[in-house]
Amino acid sequence: MALPSTESPRKLSAVHLWERAQQQVPGGTFRSPTDLQTVLEILVESLREEAHLHDLGIQYFQDFLLRLLTNHLKLQAEYDRHPEILTIPLPRPLFVVGLFRSGTTFLHNLLSQDPRSRWLSVAEALYPTPAPDPNSWGEDPRIAQAVEHIAFQTSLAPQFSAAHYINAVRPAECSRLFEHDLIGHLFDFRVSVPTYSQWLLQQDLTAAYQSYRRQLQYLSWHWPHSHWVLKAPAHLLALDTLLQVFPDAAIVYLHRDPLQVLPSCCSLAATGRSRFSHEVEGATVGAQWFPLLQTATQRALRVREKLQTRHRLAPEGTSPLYDVSYNTLVNHPQETIASIYDYFGYELTPEMAQNLQTWIQENPQHKHGVHRYSLEQFGLEEAQVKAAFSDYYDRFQALLES
């Protein structure tokens, strides 16, 4: 449902949510790659004890978590009824990765202008069942549901759109699919849940990525395409797992100076949290996001080292990772797309080229407002950031300055 329920606010209860989900999907069976009930208990406890939810926040997360659980049950039922779904091929998917706030959304929107590609919309990420069909999608009631959902969230923090504009029928971050197994760092943008986040960083996400792959197969079922175009900064935390589950993946890695990324990310998180919490402190946001982005960078660097060793004797251009400078993307978007297509062997058709030009003209930077922020707002200092990301600066200084 798009808006919070009218039930009286109560303390979040994992048991209550679990039972209600099963009531809403009679006969549904939870078959998560992890112990979903345990994950729910960890997340709910973190929400109850650490998120400082106000009454509206409690109502919202009751409905939000219930939607994720019922989506999980409905998807499992679809797999059971139609096992052929899990045989659907996913030819060379294209993933956009990079630190949060490094231009990944902009690049994702550009790559999604290819009419032959398939991308995840916000509406189907929120409501994935029944399987969407391109022939009827324009009139699908889920779009109106998603519009209502987004409008409600925007009403709680109108300034959020200046930093991160969300539209029901535009490309969505594919991290939303992981949330059907209650996995994902998007929760950190919505609320303060450090216990859950630290637990998540310690998990092997192989099974979660396999569940994510099944959802992409399901969404491909009635929607033919040449390849998926997907985007999630959180993939940086598990690039090795992504490549294990998608061995032919094409990965575009965006690079932007952490001194710009970190305060932007913290500002977005602070704004997002203000919608549901009565206590949002800048220093707390900074203290939580700083190590998370540092961990993502370090893990990605380790994966790169392994890939470089593996491809050292292989022909040039065989690495699944292609590096792109944020500054180059912003200043030369069409040329950047052409270089990506050339590297990975996708065909840049005249229709795609025209779509790119139109989208760029219709969506100038800051169209939805200017996002302003500083390190100091979040208790962070320049020297501190440079020291923490020194390995990253050493490896990518040229890209960061280009």
Image: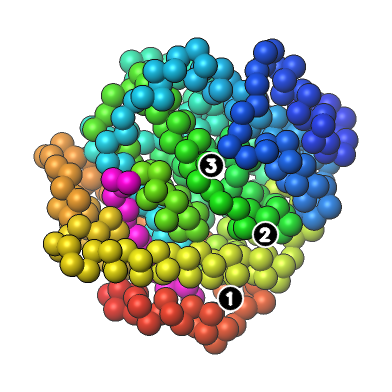
Q: Amino acid at mark 2?
A: Gln
The residue located at (71%, 71%) in the rendering is: 283
Does the image show residue 155?
yes
Q: Nearer the viewer, residue 64 or 68?
A: 68
Query: Which numbered disc, 3 or 1, marks the residue closer to the eye?
Result: 3
Badge 2 vs badge 1, beta-carbon distance below 8 Å? no
Q: Quadrant of residue 4?
A: top right
Identify the magenta region: 247-259
Which residue corresponds to mark 1? 375
Pointer 2: what residue? 198
**Would you name the residue on which mark 3 appears?**
208
Kind of residue sitting beneath label 3 = Ala
Q: Residue at x 27, y 41 (%)?
A: 92
The residue carrying pointer 2 sits among few (fewer than 14), some (14 to 19) or many (20 or more) residues within 10 Å by Cα, namely: few
Above or below residue 110? Residue 81 is above
Can residue 338 be seen by looking at this rendering?
A: no
Q: Earlier in the sequence, mark 3 or mark 1?
A: 3
**How far apart in space, not on screen, are marks 2 and 1 (Cα)?**
23 Å
> Do the numbered discs 3 and 1 sit on residues whose CB atoms are within 8 Å?
no
Residue 362: x %, y % from top left: 31, 45
| Above or below: residue 15 compared with residue 207 | above
Across and down, in percent, residue 152 comes to 64, 36
Q: Is residue 362 above or below residue 322?
A: above
The earlier-in-sequence mark between 2 and 1 is 2
Circle 1 — which element?
A: helix
Q: CA distance from mark 3 to mark 2?
A: 17 Å
What is the quadrant of the N terminus in the image? top right
Residue found at x 41% / y 69%: 301
